Amino acid sequence: MALLEAEELLDQVARERSTLSDAPTGDALNALNETFDRIETIARRLRDALSDVGGVSVEQAASRLNVTAPTIRKWIREDFLEPIPDRKPVEIDARSVVRVERILDKVRETYPAREWTRALGAFLHDRDLLAQDWAREGIEQAKRGEFVDL
Amino acid sequence: MQSKMLFRIQATPAAKKAIESLPRRTAGRFEQLRQELRSNGCKAGGYRLLSDDRTTPSTYCCKHLDRDWRVVTTFRTERIVRIVAIGRHDGPGFYAGLSSELGISSTGQRRDAKPGCCVGNWPSIGHDPNGYRYG
């Protein structure tokens, strides 16, 4: 779980830094950027050290995201979470856990409490639809600009 | 009397192939949709799908064609409709799975609170680097 905390810290630093990039320049801003540089360096060292030990277990990811272990396994099969190759038992890349956590947080923040499950359902529905083989094939062709007149 | 300007319709090769092999009843529904798209553009496109990494709308729309058949479209300019993909999606099965996976009731979770395909006047104003136009 410490790995997840390090990953989240790195993610948060990146977000704060992107907010700062829109602010006017000045000494205070430069000092803040330098502080972020130091925090990022420490967090990166911590993350790298913890990554050597391994990724996040299915049970840890389930606890963190507040879902069941079968849901975590399903999300791995659907490429929503990224497993670390050649690890038995399964270990999950901490970055993908933090990414999914952000999505869940955003859904909860964006919608009132009574509606966030509906919004999450809609998000997952659309994601599931666009992940169908037939949809992926069409989207890939569209991205390449392959169209014919009907 | 001035004639109404029709939308041009294009499809990916995959969508075209799917159209040619639709079951008879579904093919009839698609022909109806094609006429609606030709006349009304994104107004006939169904609802706007959410993007993959956030809760904002994507550049794709989805129209329920017949039973579990779905048509995914996008709009390059205001006068061109592009059919990206056609296929079957087991929506009810998906929603039923939600209740066991996330503790979300499958009841009332249909994708009904959804933005229209033309939400924000999309695709009539605004540009992005890929040439898509947004409201």
Image (cartoon, rainbow, N blue to C red):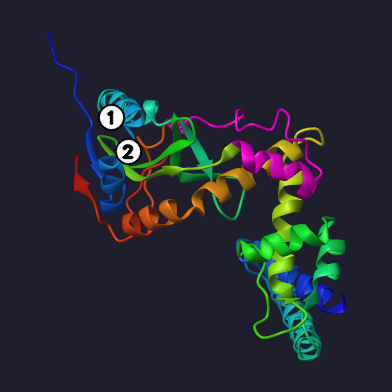
Residue at the farthest left position: B1
Does residue B117 appear left or right of residue A97 in this picture? Answer: left
* Residue A44 place in picture, x, y as percent: 74, 84
For label 2, count other residues whose C-alpha is less than 10 Å away and answer few (under 14), some (14-19) or many (20+): some
Q: Which residue is mark 1?
A: B34
Q: Residue at x 39, y 26 (%)?
A: B43
The local secondary structure at tag 1 comes to helix
Q: Which residues are magenta?
A: B92-120
Task: Examine the image and state in which quarter residue B93 appears.
Answer: top right
Residue at the farthest front position: B24
Does residue A60 appear left or right of residue A33 in this picture? Answer: right
Name the subunit of mark 2. B
Name the subunit of mark 1. B
Compared with B88, A87 (above or below) is below
Q: Residue at x 68, y 41 (%)?
A: A121
Measured Cα–Cα span from mark 2 to mark 1: 14 Å
Compared with A84, B73 (above or below) is above
Visible residue check, residue B99 = yes
Q: Which residue is mark 2?
A: B22
Q: Which amino acid type is marked by label 1?
A: Arg
Q: Residue at x 30, y 61 (%)?
A: A144
For label 1, count other residues whose C-alpha is less than 10 Å away and answer few (under 14), some (14-19) or many (20+): some
Compared with A72, B1 (above or below) is above
Residue at the farthest top position: B1
Does residue A77 appear left or right of residue B41 in this picture? Answer: right
